[in-house]
Amino acid sequence: MKEIFSKRLKSARVLASLSQDQLVEKMGNVVSKNAISKYEKGEMMADSTVLLALSKALNVKPDYFFRPFTVEIEKVEFRKKQRLSVKDVNAIKQTVTDFVERYIEVEQFLNIASTFVNPIKALVVSSIKEIDKAALQVRAEWKIGLNALPNVIDLLEDNEIKVIEVDAPDEFDGFSGWADGKIPIIVINKNYNVERKRLTALHELGHLILNLNDTISNKEKERFCFQFAGAMLIPEPTFKSEIGDIRSHFSIPELVAIKETYGISIQAIMARAKDLGVINESQFISFRKWISRNRTEEGLGSYKGMEQAFRFKQLIYRAAAEEVISLSKAANLSNQKLAEFRKEFVAL
């Protein structure tokens, strides 16, 4: 019990991005920094008064501190800008670990067995030219044809991949990994616009499922995964049907129309055109110079669809409605206060 408490306390503190000193201050100096240190080392156990103070300061339920650790996140492919601090990185990882634990717990309550099958496991990718082949094979295996993907997150969750949105700084793009070595997870920044969410989610899918040759460098892997994301959003046959085999010029309304139909940024569209040989390197460089004044593509249309991870909350509503779990437990799994959960939950 003491060992679980010590790990959970440190986990909650990291999750809250607090130092030991900051935690003591937020608790109103109920205990000293030395006491917090001893708790986290498993040398001392908190009494009920301190436990409630910790719970309030760290915004977790008291029983959080005694919940056994059940999930380990492995093989993490973390994409971020150098400005993202180590503290932020650790907080994001801890947020994800906590979320996946709750996700798996609600699935267990509902007797849902989650089994992921990599649709392109046998396909070894050795060159950039094979990326489009991989994307087409995924689309074929998942029976989604060649049309626009209405909702990328739904697609991934329907195929047993857990998608998690985190409230993170702009410097964080996303990451992918495996929970307990068998459950694929994709994490994206919930603050990004819808086109960037879609591209990032599929980029991380590439990290999860592409069987890349060992000789490929990390920089090339990023390029391969970026092209894979573009190929998933608008596959080669569709792209050339919409745009043509060779182009010398584009109109802005044409690019906006493609962006709004396929949910892919204009910058990714033009990168795709270069990769497929529709435009040459010189044309692409000219485009990059032009778009550099408007990287956010303000005024250049937007995808009208919505990208949000709903499955986890839907499972909690289902478990509560069928009385598999109590409303109190449902609120706990949702990481909400009971009154807040009651307000949004209506059973028929």
Image (spheres, helix red, strand yellow):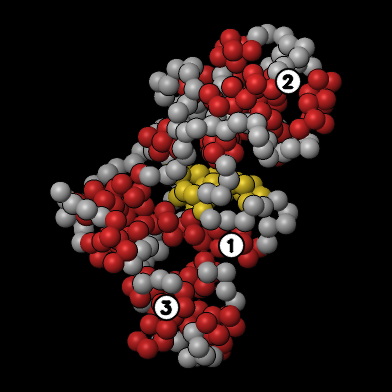
Residue at x 54% of width, y 36% of height: 198
Return the disc, 3 or 2, that comes first in the chain's sequence. 3
* Nearer mark to the viewer, of 3 and 1: 3
* Quarter location, residue 289: top right
Residue 255 horizontal/vertical position (percent): 65, 22
Q: Nearer the viewer, residue 131 or 348?
A: 348
Look at label 2 and name its amino acid.
Lys
Q: Secondary structure at mark 3?
A: helix
Q: Quadrant of residue 144?
A: top left
Q: Is residue 262 left or right of residue 107?
A: right
Mark-to-mark CA distance, 3 and 2: 54 Å
In the displayed structure, would residue 27 be above or below residue 329? below
Percent coordinates x, y for residue 20 in the rendering: 57, 80
On screen, residue 215 above or below 192: above
Can you say whether 300 is above or below 322 in the image? Answer: above
Q: Which mark is residue 274?
A: 2
Read off the residue under disc 3.
Answer: 56
Instruction: Find numbered disc 2 in the image and state the secondary structure of the residue it sits on.
Output: helix
Q: Which residue is mark 1?
A: 90
Q: Earlier in the sequence, mark 3 or mark 1?
A: 3
In this view, the residue in front, 18 or 10, is: 18
C-alpha span from label 1 to label 2: 37 Å
Judge whether residue 59 can be spotted in this image. Answer: yes
* Mark 3 to mark 1 CA distance (whole Å): 21 Å
CA neighbours of label 1 inside 10 A, class few (<14), some (14 to 19), many (20+):
some
- Chain-order first, disc 1 or disc 2: 1
